[in-house]
Image: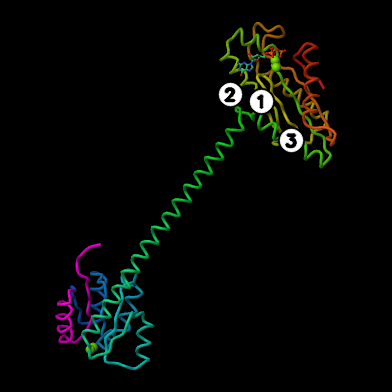
Amino acid sequence: MTNSPDVLLIIEDRLVDTLILTRFLGQAGFKVISAKSGEEGIEIATTMLPDLILLDVMMPGMNGFDVCDRLKNKNQTTEIPVIFMTALTDTLDKLRAFEAGAADYITKPLKHEEVLARINAHLKIRKLQRQLQIQNQKLQAEIAERKLAEARLEEANRELQRLANLDGLTQVANRRLFDRQIEQEWRRHLREQQTLSIILCDVDHFKNYNDNYGHLAGDSCLQLIAKGIQNALHRSTDIVARYGGEEFIVILPNTKTEGAIQVGEVIHQAIEILNIPYEHSPLKNYVTVSLGVASIIPNIALNPLDLVGTADKALYIAKAQGRDQVVY
Ligand code: GH3
Ligand code: MG
Ligand code: MG
Ligand code: MG
Ligand code: MG
């Protein structure tokens, strides 16, 4: 807030009226500028942006109504309060003034105290309006900022959620997500009486691999295998998860036994094709996996653990039969 005086613009064709009013308002503490025609008034109003305009109605050239109309239609001047001053007292004229956007209307001969009171009233209203506008702008900015912060938080939460469901080493789903997904798929397959299949995939002689190549190489090997399994899956609904140390598990929704065995073979081959060197392997000279496949149409007497148990038994048999194979 500045302490500079409010600026009043008088638009009036009669010089003597302007002089008297200017003198009085100047003594009242205002800075007064004036124009002697509507055209000049519009120009001064647009460049000086006064705080309030006192506008005569009857002038040669543009009359006051048209001047007010024009000021109200200009962005820069639309909010400056305009008080009409005229000898006209007809109600229709007053209505026309307000239609043109006048803030107020004073009839001539002017009573100075009344002019002063009305000017002060309208300046006060204008100031309050400005404060409201500023507060409103601040509020809008705050709302926008808060919305942005909320969106960022949501995004961060989603990312956190995503990370909470991913295995840190291999970037496939972790056990937590698997447990949730298998429950969900189980219920859906129970409702729809469809076949749900899973595949357990365990790296052969991996302890020995770690012992030979070191734990870091073992980690890299697990990353490659996770990728290999993921790339071997072609349905977007299939999910691979890290089930435990060097064990992965695949959920195959709506997949019958033959299909699941086929996917098992594809994974088996995909890992073979990776050809991860394993010189000391008791089996081949590259890393191999054993896979146990299980399928079921869920019923209420069983639960997902039964399905995992069946796959685990198949995997055990695959190991017992010499590893590097798929068993149903
Ligand atoms: P099998 O053919 O019977 O599966 O033999 P195996 O050696 O693979 O089985 P075992 O369960 O005896 O050993 C699994 C090994 O996997 C033990 C552990 O050192 C290794 N392992 C488990 N998790 C990780 C891991 O995150 N990183 C690495 N590098 N090794 C892991
Ligand atoms: Mg006049
Ligand atoms: Mg006049
Ligand atoms: Mg194992
Ligand atoms: Mg193993």
Residue lying furthest bottom in this view?
90
The CB of the residue at mark 1 lies under 8 Å from ligand 1: no
| Mark 1: amino acid | Arg
> For numbered disc 2, what is the local secondary structure?
loop
> Whole-percent x and y of residue 162?
59, 35
Quadrant (top left/top right/bottom left/bottom right) for the N terminus: bottom left
Alpha-carbon distance for marks 3 and 1?
16 Å
Q: At label 3, which amino acid type do we have? A: Glu
Left or right, residue 287 beside residue 81: right
Mark 2 beta carbon near ligand 1 (under 8 Å): yes
Please tell me how crowded label 1 is: few (under 14), some (14-19), or many (20+) other residues with Cα within 10 Å.
Answer: many
Q: How far apart are marks 2 and 1 (CA)?
A: 9 Å
At horizontal 36% and vertical 79% (from top left) the residue drawn is: 101
Tell me the element at label 1: strand
Position of residue 81 in the picture relative to residue 325 (left or right): left
Q: Where is residue 272 in the image (x, y as percent from the top left)?
A: 69, 17
The residue that mark 2 highlights is 169
Please give the residue where the numbered disc 3 appears in the rendered image. 183
Identify the element where label 3 is drawn. Answer: helix
Inter-mark Cα distance, 3 to 2: 24 Å
Residue 3, percent from left and from top:
20, 65
Mark earlier in primary sequence (3, 1): 3
Amino acid under disc 2 = Leu
3 and 1 marks in contact (CB < 8 Å) = no
With respect to residue 308, does 91 lie above or below? below
Q: Give the range drawn in magenta.
A: 1-29
The local crowd at label 2, few if under 14, some if 14 to 19, many if 20 or more residues have their Cα within 10 Å, is: few
Report the residue marked by disc 1: 242
Pick the residue in front: 222 or 235.
222
Work out whether mark 2 precedes mark 1 in sequence or the reverse, and give the earlier one.
2
